[in-house]
Amino acid sequence: MKKKQFIWMILLSMLLMLILACGGTTTDGQGTGDRQGDVPGGVGEADEISIVTPEPDLHRDELNAILMRVTMLDGVSINGVDVSGMTKEEAKNAVSSALSAKKNDLSINVTFGDASEVFSAETVKTDDDLDAVITEAFSIVREDIGFDAVSAEVERIKKNGMDFPVHLSFNESALNDAVNAFADAHETAPVNACVSYNKEENKIDYTPDVPGRKVNREALFSALLDAEGGETLEAPAEEIPAEVTLKDIQEKYVLRSTYTTKYSKSNKNRKENIRHGTMDLLTGTIVHPGDVFSMNECLGVRKKDGHWKIATAFQAGKHVKEYGGGVCQISTTLYNAAVMSDMEIVFRQNHSMPVDYVDKGRDATINSIGNIIDFKFKNSSKSDIIIIGNADGKTLTIEIWGIPLVEDSNGEYDEIRIPTPKKTKTLKPTGEVLYQIDETKPVGYKEEVAKKRDGSVWESKKEYYLNGVLVKTEDLATSTYKAYAGEYIVGPSAGSDDDKTPQPSDSGEKTPKPTDSGTKTPKPTDPGTKTPKPTDPPENTPKPTDPPENTPKPTDPPEDTPKPTDPPEDTPKPTDPPTDPPADPPDNPPDDPPSDDDNGE
């Protein structure tokens, strides 16, 4: 018992000392300092000691409830949708439903010149920042600034409301693809200034250049990304200048080259073919830089159902009748003009034998049926060229117009000439004379259709001049004209047996003698001795003259030389070809003329 009392006394003493040390108060509100009496530092009898404790915070729980809430504050809306008291998930569901309807309003009309296109949620994928906005709306009034201040802010939001808008925009990747597709569809490339030929007024017309327009894709992308629905945007544009402007070509087109051939002695049909091909089809042709001109494409196929007339052409060393005969003179004249205009010759072939309207080595044959032969050149200049021709029935002239040669050659040359080609080789005929039997001809008939002639090889050059001074020379072409042993059309022998048809034979054997058919037919003698001399034919049979002494004697033809035989019964028999071309075509000429690798119209 005494022990417990002792402990309590100690505790009481310690408490008293603590109170005195901390400055305790008396009932009269004075401190525990010196008394107002005669006992310094003592304790008055009437004084009472009290302990002051902190006043408890009655609003702490209410404040914590506000700061630690799991729902939106009253008065909060997102994109116009009231989400008061909702959790984040509930708010997202409520706003997403309304946001789908808003996507339909994201429609932006984009214009570019005369073109326009609508960018919308239907055509371009969209994105929104709904999740970020919900987080922001949920995070307001979370800071402990005291109950009174927090309460005031809550009341203000509840009374006035607070809306958090959602930003709806196009998906960047999808928008980038859509902008590129729009630009690709509506951008325009620049159009160079060009020239054309006015046939009616016989002059060159100039067409101005047109600049291109290019979409500034980066600027349009940014504008669409920030745009709101219902807007109209004009796509930012950039102008692309043309490479060739009107200023570049106007007054600069000059006559680069011209070449003339004569045809005044041609018959009416050949003249019309040359006129039609030159004036109706060739004149006014524009060839762009880098493009290849084709003579056959320009003239088309020369056949019966066209405008073409029957006229003389070359075939295997002889003259034949073909539709469009004479057009080789057009290709030849153009070939010379093209060379002197510095065009790149893509393909050119000379005739099987020389022609009389141009120097050997300067002709260019063409053929449009059978073995196709074309004349082609490439426009190797820096600008369009215009081909202008004139055929007046006497002379054929073809001109090529373009920018000056000196400009094209960067000042290296201003003129090109073709000197007279030189003969480098003579070719002798090989094989024997060819005899073709025509059963429609009378016995003893003999007509020379291809003369015996030597062939030759010619070399042509191309000379470049500057101010009249030769600066360089280049090889142009090698032209080979074939040698021919000759060809005859003969009538049938007196007999009709196949073994009695006149044909070349071995030099050691006798040529078969035809049997008597009522008239006397020249009997070929042994070719190893002398040339057979025909006997007098009937009066209505043309009298063949003695062949000259240098007429080749028939021998076995080489293996590659076809031997003429009697045509089968179902083979149509050729008619007697006229010696001179007819002025007008026959009523029913063949639809397609014969073709050969040496054809030349």
Image (cartoon, grey):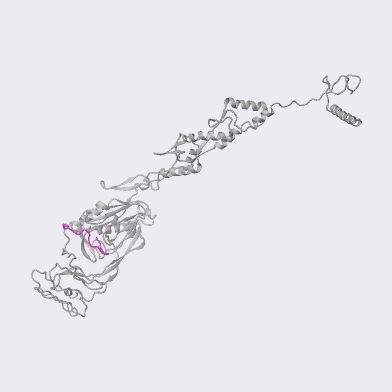
Residue segment shown in magenta: 585-601
| Left/right of residue 160 with respect to residue 436 in the rendered view | right
- 331 relative position to 265: left or right: right
In this orientation, which residue lies closer to the viewer: 147 or 489?
147
Residue 138 in the image: above or below residue 527: above
Magenta span main SS: loop
Q: Quadrant of the N terminus?
A: top right
Above or below, 575 relative to 26? below
Question: Magenta includes 407?
Answer: no
- Residue 352 image position (x, y, % from top left): 26, 65
Position of residue 480 relative to residue 552, above or below, is above
Residue 185 appearing in the image: yes
Image height check: is 174 above or below 418?
above
Residue nearer the viewer, 338 or 315 = 315
Residue 529's spot in the image, x, y percent?
Answer: 18, 80
Q: Position of residue 316 (x, y in %)?
A: 24, 66
